[in-house]
Amino acid sequence: MTPNNATPMAQTPTQRLAAAAAGFTADNLPPDTLESAKDYLLDHIAVSLYGMQQPWSGFVADMVAADGGAAQASVYGRGLRVPASAAALVNGTAAHGFELDDWHAGSLSHLGAAVIPAVLAIAERDRLHGRDVLAAIVAGYEVMARAGMSVAPGVIMRGYHPTGTHGPIGAAAGVGNLLRVAPKVMTAALGIGASCAAGLMEFSQDEEGTMVKRVHAGRAAQAGVVAIDLALRGLTAPRASLDGKYGYAKVFSDAPNPDALTRGLGEDFEIRRNNVKPYACCGMLHAPMDAVEDIMRTHQIALADIDDVVIGGSRAVVEQHASTAPESVMAAQYSMPYAAAVALLGRSLDPRMFDEGSFRDAQVLGLARRIRLEIDPEIEAVFPGKLAGAARIRLKDGRQYEARVIDARGTTDNPFGRDGIIAKARALCDGLLRPAAIDELIERVFGFERATDAGTLAQFLDQCVAPIRITGLR
């Protein structure tokens, strides 16, 4: 209690962000942000069902099934109910399981894969309203993006995986908003989440040991649930966990930007700057892929006529995405030369080009080995706010063509729109859900503000998806 003659301590940026996140409701948020939350919810469910088929998702699902515990929340499409934190772990892993999940350029992270599984798990556990879930998604995206912008791009250049580091903070914010926690509790939860920040970029350097990257999002979602649970029980964390002397911004970046935590807070929303992936690979690779496809399509180039291909990108692309001989699905999805080779073939939209059956393809690898990367100063100058890219293709007869793409397909300034998101969801769910069930899924999501029990969405998936039994590569 502050003495009568004492000056109250000024709120830290962490506290101001926490208070804002705690106070967002469906009634006071701009309607367009809630509509965006529906778009990303549909995209999340579709990419998660696709990712749930992958071996790494199977490993995590098998582990939580073996652990058992209270049947609180559903693992998407597996006919399995587990403790809420465990459901968040599996579903977050699946959401990030095939590099198709939404992403935010300014924070260099995947907001939906960390935030939505945590929010949906608690909503199912406590039988909460769909309208409140949508507001919680907006809150979680806002906090995770702002935490990320306070450390980007330094966080990734220091070797941390941003989704794993910002994710626990955003997931905690989403769950805290959903449960209507007080600002003091939210401040503690964000601090607990910040202390759970983890995830190393070394997976981008190892051709085989790459599966762990998928779990970074799952662990982030799980940590968000745990952070709120502990904060509600009274566990405290520093008032300046994100902005303090040894807070998140200053620890995870050589050039911290703590102003990003509160600049324009409540006036604009980062969910408006989120992006949807058309291609099953790292978002940094999309603009160069677009550039390659633009050149190939515009000039009707045959593969046999190509002499040389150069990709221009940011320093992060050149240093962390240069592999020409991937030895795993993840390595292919993080390889700029491999992704550019897929684009040369005109197959960018086919996620199967990055799966276990394709990344060893001799034609694709042969093309990848011929692709060179170079840092483009103009592209580096707009990074990370814009993940731009360029391509230069020289033909054997000496002709040369160039293209530069600042805004890749699916990004804020070159958006899919709702129709594009629905088309993507239909394509990913084809073969997993019956056509009528896909229609119902879309209807449920876009009417989610009327769902009195948000948990019925995950339970619906169990009714219409044959339980997935993949247990991995053994």
Image: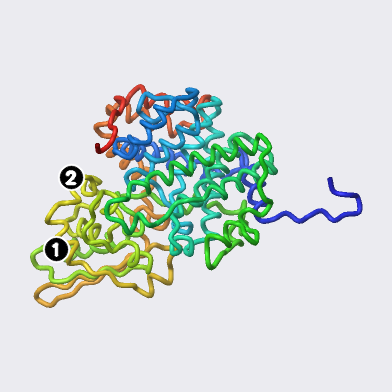
Q: How many marks?
A: 2
Element type at marker 1?
Answer: loop
Query: What percent of the width, then of the height, locates residue 148?
Result: 51, 56
Residue 202, image x and y in percent? Answer: 37, 57
299 with respect to 407 (left or right) = left
Scheme of colours in the image: rainbow
For marks 1 and 2, the one nearer the N-term is 1
Q: In the rendering, which numbered label is found on residue 300?
A: 1
Residue 88 image position (x, y, % from top left):
46, 36
Please name the residue shown 66% across and 56% down the image.
Answer: 13
Which residue lies under the disc numbered 2?
A: 357
Residue sitting at the far right? 5
Kind of residue at badge 2: Gly
Taking 423 as reference, is 126 above or below it?
above
CA–CA distance between discs 1 and 2? 28 Å
Dot 2, how many residues are within 10 Å of its Cα: few (below 14), some (14-19), or many (20+)? few
Task: Give the structural element (helix, strand or loop) at label 2.
Answer: loop
Give the farthest residue toward the bottom.
Answer: 398
